[in-house]
């Protein structure tokens, strides 16, 4: 039986507080089928702990609201984290974001952000795989991890599904990548949604972590890619499908991969150390 340990002491980095000026980070929210009002403060807190990031938040108008004043200054930041899943942005904003990433900006797609913009070709190239929003075989193939490699399947069906929320084991697929270096080969993740049957271009992606979508929880029986990077032009994209709610986000495995993935997207390197407590193959670790 898997064991879950709860930690009430603050989580510290193994190294001293960063001496350099913090990296500027922009979080975008405002529309989502998930509770962005709860998850954005957690994202901001987890990224800013340790002093590596300083995060601003831009909140979009609500659905059917006036977007005439919504014009984030992407170029001001080395990395943008999306917690947005809603109406299309104005064309000028989409063009600016595409230019930002293509010219070398960092982008982090967090959980349901990959449900957004099914018709925006460049966005779907940035995230490689997305779900829901009417996605189907026309949106691109499904991608699974089989026999040590990524396999794409062009077959009919809806894009985007998850079974019952549960604790599940993540397999680290590239232990030498800066984001994953030092993470256990297998580690338990706190109770969360496990996305499956995601669709998209599935191009220029490098798989970092997968999980078996078990049929007993309503899954596919496939190893689904949940953590990966994507190259888009000169930009670096980190895509995490983890983190449905506070319970899932309190997993130290989620924290480590979020922080390291955001640093990598911003700089192409990871200088921060691992957190002191990490999950193991049979134990979830939460703060």
Image (cartoon, rainbow, N blue to C red):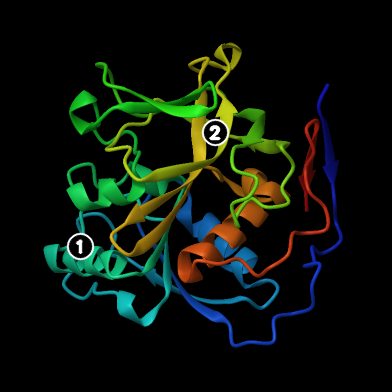
109 sits left or right of 163 in the view: left
Quadrant assignment for the N terminus: top right
In the figure, 232 relative to 244: above or below? below
**Residue at the spot of label 2:** 193
* Residue at 58% in and 17% down: 214
Give x and y (percent) for residue 272.
68, 68
User: In what element is the residue under mark 2?
Assistant: loop
Q: Nearer the viewer, mark 1 or mark 2?
A: 1
In the figure, 236 relative to 281: above or below? below
Occupied quadrant, residue 118: top left
**Residue at the spot of label 1:** 94
Give x and y (percent) for residue 63.
25, 54
* Residue at 27% in and 64% down: 102
Give x and y (percent) for residue 183.
71, 47
276 sits left or right of 83 in the view: right
In the figure, 273 relative to 191: above or below? below
**Circle 1 Cα neighbour tier, 10 Å, few/some/many (<14 / 14–19 / ≥20):** some
| Disc 1 from disc 2: Cα separation | 28 Å
Asked whether the viewer can see residue 247, the reply is yes
User: In what element is the residue under mark 1?
Assistant: helix
Occupied quadrant, residue 88: bottom left
Instruction: Please tell me which of labels 1 and 2 falls first in the chain.
Output: 1
Asked whether the viewer can see residue 251, the reply is no
Which residue is more in the foreground, 47 or 191?
A: 47
* Residue at 54% in and 33% down: 193
Give x and y (percent) for residue 249.
63, 49
257 sits left or right of 221 in the view: right
């Amino acid at each position: 039986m898997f064991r879950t340990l709860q930690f009430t002491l603050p989580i510290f980095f193994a190294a001293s507080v960063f001496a350099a000026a913090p990296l500027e980070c922009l979080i975008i929210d405002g529309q989502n089928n998930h509770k962005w009002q709860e998850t954005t403060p957690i994202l901001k807190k987890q990224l800013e702990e340790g002093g590596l990031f300083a995060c601003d938040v831009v909140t979009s108008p609500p659905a059917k609201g006036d977007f005439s004043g919504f014009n984030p200054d992407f170029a001001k930041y080395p990395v943008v984290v999306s917690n947005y899943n809603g109406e299309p942005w104005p064309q000028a904003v989409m063009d600016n974001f595409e230019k930002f990433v293509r010219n070398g900006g960092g982008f982090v797609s967090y959980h349901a952000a990959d449900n957004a913009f099914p018709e925006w070709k460049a966005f779907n190239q940035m995230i490689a795989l997305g779900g829901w929003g009417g996605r189907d075989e026309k949106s691109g193939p499904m991608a699974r991890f089989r026999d040590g490699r990524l396999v794409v399947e062009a077959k009919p069906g809806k894009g985007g599904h998850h079974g019952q929320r549960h604790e599940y084991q993540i397999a680290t697929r590239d232990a030498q990548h800066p984001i994953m270096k030092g993470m256990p080969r297998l580690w338990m993740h706190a109770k969360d949604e496990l996305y499956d049957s995601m669709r998209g271009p599935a191009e220029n992606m490098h798989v970092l972590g997968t999980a078996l979508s078990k049929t007993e929880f309503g899954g596919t029986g496939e190893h689904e890619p949940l953590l990966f990077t994507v190259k888009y032009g000169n930009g670096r994209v980190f895509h995490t499908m983890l983190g449905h709610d506070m319970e899932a986000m309190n997993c130290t495995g989620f924290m480590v991969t979020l922080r390291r993935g955001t640093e990598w997207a911003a700089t192409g390197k990871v200088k921060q150390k691992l957190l002191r407590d990490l999950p193991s193959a049979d134990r979830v670790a939460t703060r």
